[in-house]
Image (spheres, grey):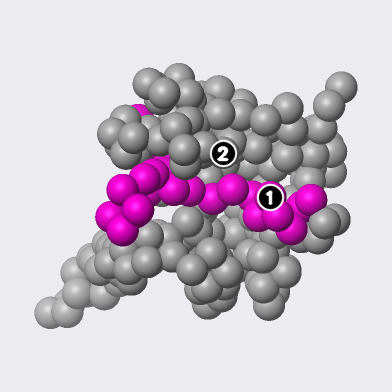
Amino acid sequence: MAKRMAFYFDSSACVGCKTCQVTCKDKNNLPLGVRWRRVLEYSGGSWVPQGDQMIPNNVFGYTVSLACNHCEKPICVEVCPTQAMHKRDDGVVLIDAEKCIGCRYCDWACPYGAPQFNEISGKMTKCNFCEDLLAKGENPACVDACPVRALNYGDIGELRSKLGTVSAIEPLPEADLTFPSLVITPNRHAQFSGKGTGKILDLTEEEV
């Protein structure tokens, strides 16, 4: 059976430094507002009265590093009218810029927000799993950049056999939408997708 490439993310180790995000943007020379990898801070909790004061209760927070998950059933490929969005035999989902007409159907369909429109080129763009580096036997740039080794990659079957089958924690969508090629070691505070009580805090960075 052919290998199917997947990312591994250890949310229990991630410190939210965003080095992976910055490295991806730099390596791919991405314009303002386009981020192929994003680090999301998810947190929550409540306040309870104690005397004449309110004190925090059940406060939690953790970060999630997110890029294209090169899904088993990529909905972006299904909705693309020109077949610009396509999936290789190794599971990596790519965009053929020559065929892309910038219609944004893939952007609207993807539950992860992975395909992103480049206003300069008029084309859709997304994480390509650093295909140029993989071809040379090197690691994706985000993997090598992580200072705490919270990111890795490999064959989805091998990753699952070693590290478990979790692929959906908040704020990510439930896995059965597209069956992402992703394995996660959850943070101890992590809430499973669809059962979240928190919210994403750093939405102001969307234009970075």
Q: Residue 131 got which mark?
A: 1
Q: Which residue shows up at 53% across the image and 45% down it?
A: 68
Q: Quadrant of the N terminus?
A: top right
| Position above or below: 63 against 160 | below
Q: What residue type is labelled 2?
A: Leu
Q: Which of marks 2 and 1 is nearer the N terminus?
A: 2
The single residue placed furthest to the left in the displayed view is 52
- Toward the front, the furthest residue is 98
Viewer-proximal residue among 136 and 98: 98
Q: Position of residue 152 (x, y in %)?
A: 73, 57
Judging by the rendered image, the residue that carries numbered circle 2 is: 94
Residue at the spot 51% in from the left edge and 38% down from the top edge: 95
Q: Can residue 38 be seen in this view?
A: yes
The range drawn in magenta is 109-135
Residue at image point 47% right, 56% down: 36
The residue lying at 68 percent from left, 77 percent from top is 147
Say which quadrant the C terminus sits in.
Answer: bottom left
The quarter holding residue 150 reads bottom right
Residue 61, magenta (yes or no): no
Give the crowd class for mark 2: few <14, some 14-19, many >=20 residues within 10 Å: many
Q: In this view, does 35 lie to the left or right of 57?
A: right
